[in-house]
Image (spheres, rainbow, N blue to C red):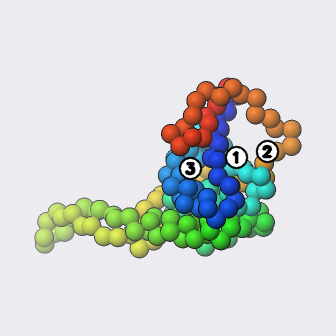
Amino acid sequence: MKLKYRRIPVFDLPTSACDLLSRAPSIVSFISNGLHHGSVLIHCQRGVSRSATALLFYLMSKQGMTLDSALSLCQEKRPSVQPIAAFMEKLREYEEQCISKELISVVNDSTEGTRVEKRKASTMKEITGPSKRKCAIGPALPPGFKLTQSVSGKSQHGGKHSDR
């Protein structure tokens, strides 16, 4: 079995919020790639704030969800999910970034011919398409699960990658 993991060295402290937001694209990319090849486990010490924030970045960016709907989904699956206030503030900023992406469409009009239109997305679902892959969120690692792989390198943001 091939297992890849990434460690994001962020603490559950308000001072870590900016750092976590700057890592959002890398987090979303890692989760997307993992889901493309199978399943993903997102974890932190308690499965309440940091791991939830990572999953919320993904749900907003790739699933087209608003922060409120993504948070509701996470809390439905794991009621204890509650990112700290500073993370929530950065999640709101990220939501705005996702919504403000510009959409470009080609319009074929019989009277005016073909033209290109640019506009801001009105919903995040316009930006992304639906996905049928699943993510899991939880505390630390499942009972009996051990990471025994050797470290094969570092990510561009300092997190470690490991292949077995």
Give the mark nearest the N terminus, 2 or 1: 1
The spot of residue 157 in percent (x, y) is 53, 43
Residue drawn at (78%, 67%) of the image = 79
Q: Which of 1 and 56 is in front in this view?
A: 56
Residue drawn at (65%, 71%) of the image = 85
Give the mark nearest the N terminus, 2 or 3: 3
Q: Name the residue under label 2.
A: 141
The spot of residue 156 in percent (x, y) is 50, 39
Give the mark nearest the N terminus, 3 or 1: 3
The amino acid type found where label 2 is placed reads Leu
The amino acid type found where label 1 is placed reads Leu
Q: Name the residue under label 1.
A: 41
Q: Is mark 3 on a helix, strand or loop?
A: helix
Q: Mark 3 points at which residue?
A: 27
Q: What element carries label 1?
A: strand
Q: Could you tell me if the residues under marks 2 and 1 are in contact, i.e. CB atoms within 8 Å?
A: yes
Q: Could you tell me if the residues under marks 3 and 1 are in contact, i.e. CB atoms within 8 Å?
A: no
The amino acid type found where label 3 is placed reads Ile
Q: Give the quarter of the image for residue 76.
A: bottom right
Q: Which of 101 and 123 is in front in this view?
A: 101
The spot of residue 134 in percent (x, y) is 65, 51
Q: What element carries label 2?
A: loop
The spot of residue 114 in percent (x, y) is 17, 63
**Separation of disc 3 and disc 1 at Cα?**
12 Å
Q: Nearer the viewer, residue 11 or 34?
A: 11
Assign the N terminus to one quadrant of the image: top right
Number of other residues with Cα within 10 Å of mark 2, as a class: few under 14, some 14 to 19, many 20 or more: some
**Separation of disc 2 and disc 3 at Cα?**
18 Å
Does residue 54 appear left or right of residue 122 in this picture? right
Placement of 131 over or under 82, stated as above or below: above
Instruction: Identify the residue at the far right of this view.
Output: 144
**Separation of disc 2 and disc 1 at Cα?**
9 Å
